[in-house]
Amino acid sequence: MNPAALLESLVSIPSISGEEGPIADYLFKLLSVEGFKVQRHGHSLWFQVGEGTPRLLFVSHLDTVPPCDGWTTNPWTPRWDGDKLHALGANDAKGCVATLILTAKSLMDEGDLQGSAIFAFTAEEETDGRGIRELMPLLQPLDAAVVCEPTGLQVCIAQRGELVLHCLARGTSAHVGHAHQGENAVSKAARDMVKLEAMSFDPHDLLGVTKPVVTQVSGGRAHNQVPDRCDFHVALRTTPNLQVTDIVGRIASELESEVTIHYDNYLPQATDSAQPIVQAALEAAGLQEGIGSHTASDWAFLGSVPAVKAGPGDTHRSHRPDEWLTLEECLKGVAFYRSLARAYFRRIAGE
């Protein structure tokens, strides 16, 4: 299987989140021809290499965000600049998908695994994690997992979650000419936004502090009417040391606005550095310690399965124009994942 051709084929198929059907069709046929017993649920795919326990999951996603402004070429037309492949999804995360396919092929050809490596490619990771949420019951039992995202092959052992709050400032409507008869909900919301900007929560050792960020605001009905309502949303990238109830309780107690949870599905995650999956990943990467990741991923939905996040590419290239990945990064990723799988199985067998 030619790595460059595989990368090109994947990025050439548009797969904005929720529209992964064509790439799932393509991969199902390709992987079946390569000898894998592929299973499919919706637009997510998975297959297994090896037999028995332990069962190690490698998971990445097929979908991309929509192309942003600033692309200098067609986002779905692969363009090589030396060793760099520019295309939407090249870095996040079709490069990881290609790397995992090459890894699976290598492990299958080599044989002699001391367990089962499950390879899953999910849909809708960029929106609500529906793909992995629906696959988890079908993939069980799982003993450990590797979430394949662009980390520069750094081993992430902690990841932020995502909490979104809806805040509602209520006021009293009045004619602007008699503004003293009303209560301005926009002004109330503005006071709360100033409070939020100054707020922070206890830091995590690897991820640092959590701060609320106002992301959307809507208020006022007409230019000649004192606003009686102002809605705004607040996003927090949470850390494993914080409890959602404590965060919401503190914010609600300090704001004039009403505070409710809008979204809290993406849970923060962390894996103890003594876990075999962490030690195997660090061994494969030639590193002494793991780091934290500030972006959410399918890891949020793995529950208590010990996991790390690691993969080829750079998180800072994601969701940006002219996104890219190098062929060298892909090939180094294959070597890393192969070494990780064997190191993990070896460690478990030696326990």
Image (spheres, rainbow, N blue to C red):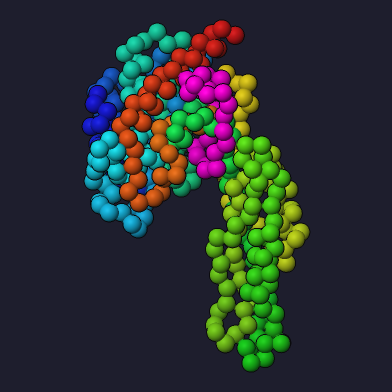
* Left or right: 350 in relation to 335: right
Q: Which residues are magenta?
A: 278-307
Q: Furthest residue to the right?
A: 253
Identify the residue at image location x=61%, y=29%. 271
- In the rendered view, does 178 fall on the left or right side of 303? right
Above or below, 213 against 346 in this view is: below
Q: Is residue 294 magenta?
A: yes
| Closest to the observer, 297 or 54 | 297
Image quadrant for the N terminus? top left
Q: In the picture provided, is 221 more to the left or to the right than 123?
A: right
Answer above or below: position of 239 versus 328: below
- Judged from this view, the residue extending furthest toward the front is 82
Front residue (pair 46, 184): 184
- Residue 272, position as x, y percentages in the image: 63, 26
Hey, which quadrant is residue 152 in on the image? top left
Residue 229 quadrant: bottom right
In the foreground, 230 or 310: 310
Residue at image position (32%, 48%) is 322
Determine if residue 245 is in view. no
**Magenta segment includes 118:** no
In this view of the protein, can residue 252 be seen by the observer? yes
Image vertical order of residue 279 relative to residue 80, above or below: above
**Residue 114 on image: x %, y %:** 46, 10
Q: Position of residue 195 (x, y in %)?
A: 70, 63
**Residue shown at 59% from the left, 64% from the top:** 232
